[in-house]
Structure formats: C-alpha cells, structure tokens
Amino acid sequence: MGGVLASLESIFELKMFCLALQNDLAVSVPLLILIVCGVNVIKEIHGMMTRYWDQYGLGIAIIAPWNCILGMGGIDSFWNEDGVGGVTFKEMFPRVYALEVNKSCTVAQRINIEDWPSVLRRSPRGGAESNQLDELLEVIRHVSVSASVDGWKWELDISGFSVSSARSYIDEHTLLGSFTSTRWLRCIPIKVNVFIWKLRLDKLPTLVNLDKKGIDVSSLLCPVCKVHVENVDHLFFLCGMAQDLWGLLARWCALDIPEVSNIMEWYSWLDTAHVSNHARSILEGIASTMLWSIWNFRNALIFSMTKPKKANIWDSIVHQSFLWISSRNPKCRFRWLDWLRNPIETHL
C-alpha cells in the first residue's frame, strides 16, 4: 500500500501547477492531472484532491471509476502503511488512531468494513475525531484487498481501461443533459452568434459562474444595479437596465413583447409571434445585438478606466444593429429613416 499512496511527494505543487496551466489551456484541472500524471497518480492523490474538486467545482472526479486493489492485505499493517507524501495513517489521522482498539491490525481487517465505530474504543465525539474518521474513510473508499499483487481496476469496462469508456464517463458529467438546437443568424456577425450560443448554455463568465469554478471574486452583485447577484438571467432580462431596454425594443418595433426572465422564454415568444419571417429575423438580430451590447456595457463597467453611460447604450444598439443587418442583407433595401421609425417594417 505504501507504494500506491506515497509516490507523489507534493500534492499542492501539482495542484498549483495544474491551476496555472488551466488558465492558459482553458481545460479542467482533473483533465490536466490526467494528462500530466496518468491515471495511477490520480488515484494515489484521491484522498485529498477529490475533496478539492467537490469544494470548488473545478471538474469531475476522474479517479472515481478506479478501484485500488491491494495484494497481501492480510500481512501489511494498516496504521503503519504510508499515506499521501510518505506519511503513515497513524500520523495523518492521530485522533482515530488513538481510538483504535487493535493498533497492530492489518490492511485486510480495516479495508471496506461497514461499522468503523465497532473497532474503536468509543464512537467519535464530533469535531476533529469525526472529521478525521470521515477523511480516512474517503481515502480508503476505493480500495479493495486481494491475494494478488497491487493494481488498479477500471470499473466502467469489464475488459479494463478504455478511452471510449473514459470519454463516455467525462461526457456524462460535463455535457448538458438535454439537447438544444443551435440558432444561427446570418444578419449578425459570427462573434455575436457564438456569444448567444454561450448565453443559452449559461457558459458566459458571469460572477456567479466564476464563483462556481472556484475563482475568487470580490462580489457576486451585478455590476450594473449592484442589488442582485449576477447570473445570465438577471443581467440580460431581470436587471433594471435590461428591462428598460426590452421595453424600448417593444415600443420601437410596435410589438407587445411580454416580460421574459430568460432567453428560452424570449425564443419561445419570438418563434410564435405573429410577424413575417423577414420581420422575425430582423427582430432576433436586433435583440441579439442588444444582448451583446449589455454584455459589453457590463464589461466596460468592470474593466474600463472610462465608465460607460447608460444613456448611450440604446442609441448604440439602434446604430449597430442597422449596420450589421443592412450590410448582411444585400438584397434588402434598408433606409436609415425607415429603420428609426420601425425596423421590422423595412421593405424588401
């Protein structure tokens, strides 16, 4: 067991190295560790690193499908075996070791037992005792004992480890559960289409999403209203500035656009609106330009030395949407004065 758990000398050096790489490569920390160290080392740091993933949500538990198989479990001493970094279990978990009835017990006598308090002098009394017992159980959770040599068992495929089973496992834990078709508008730039796609998937780096990834942010409050936490639904639909812009859009196009709280509600109304396909395409292009402008306004508030003015954002939306839509529809005749009156009534 010592050879299994003691081969990595510095857990935190590895963690910091992978976090640094993550910033440059934009991949999850567990995947980086898989690339850098291989699956065996991932398993060996399982006890500490799995708790780190769960606490900060930096990825998936890539070591979960692996089970450690220890050979000669009836001979090796459980408490004197090396743990992480060459430290024995009795040094890692001194409070539990102090409660142990049989301090010379073997690995086989302590691995996968269901009632740990039965092998202690008394039940843990909370605090450090309970915490250390929970941590010990987490470390040995994926370990089993056999008469063979030490090894690993891949639980997702009876024939052993395979890339396809690993990929399926990663996809199940990272991809969205339901399929949503991609909406692609030719009347707006590619960058805006990609932005809207990320918005629909809730993959924009809002303050709430950054916090979920374990990134330290000074505040979760929306930088525009400074009242509610910033997620995609609030920033683009529920924030006071966003609601004002949606109201301006409805009056400009002379449409009864209802109040929507997320982008799927917006698309649901848009797809059933009683307008022509030409008008619907223009309306969606303007709304996409507006969402793009809200995001740029938000970023300027946070990062720009010169703070933007709310009074200018609507004029910018009207002007930018005209340039984008008119330049990408060469067969349509767009007049600026007609656009200012009502864009969706622009004639072909």
Image (spheres, rainbow, N blue to C red):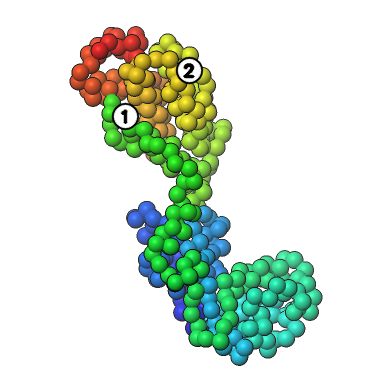
**Residue at x 75% of width, y 74% of height:** 117
**Residue at x 40% of width, y 39% of height:** 198
**Where does the image place residue 113, in percent across and percent down from the top left?**
68, 76
Residue 257 has which mark?
A: 2
Evaluate whether residue 237 shows in this view.
no
Looking at the picture, which amino acid does disc 2 mark?
Ile
Relative horizontal placement of residue 226, taking residue 334 as reference (left or right): right
Looking at the picture, which amino acid does disc 1 mark?
Leu
**Where does the image place residue 218, in percent across and percent down from the top left?**
51, 45
Q: Nearer the viewer, residue 90 or 32?
A: 32
Figure quadrant of residue 321: top left
Q: Residues within 10 Å of mark 1 (few under 14, many from 20)?
A: some
Q: Which residue is mark 1?
A: 185
**Where does the image place residue 24, in percent across and percent down from the top left?**
34, 55
Report, in whole angstroms, how far the alpha carbon at label 2 lies from the one at label 1: 20 Å
279 is higher (above) or lower (below) than 293: above
Q: Nearer the viewer, residue 156 or 36?
A: 156
The residue tagged with tag 2: helix, strand or loop? Answer: loop
**Residue at x 48% of width, y 36% of height:** 232
Taking the view exactly as shown, the residue that stands out farthest to the right is: 122
The residue tagged with tag 1: helix, strand or loop? Answer: loop
Among the two numbered marks 2 and 1 on one chain, the one whose residue lies closer to the N terminus: 1
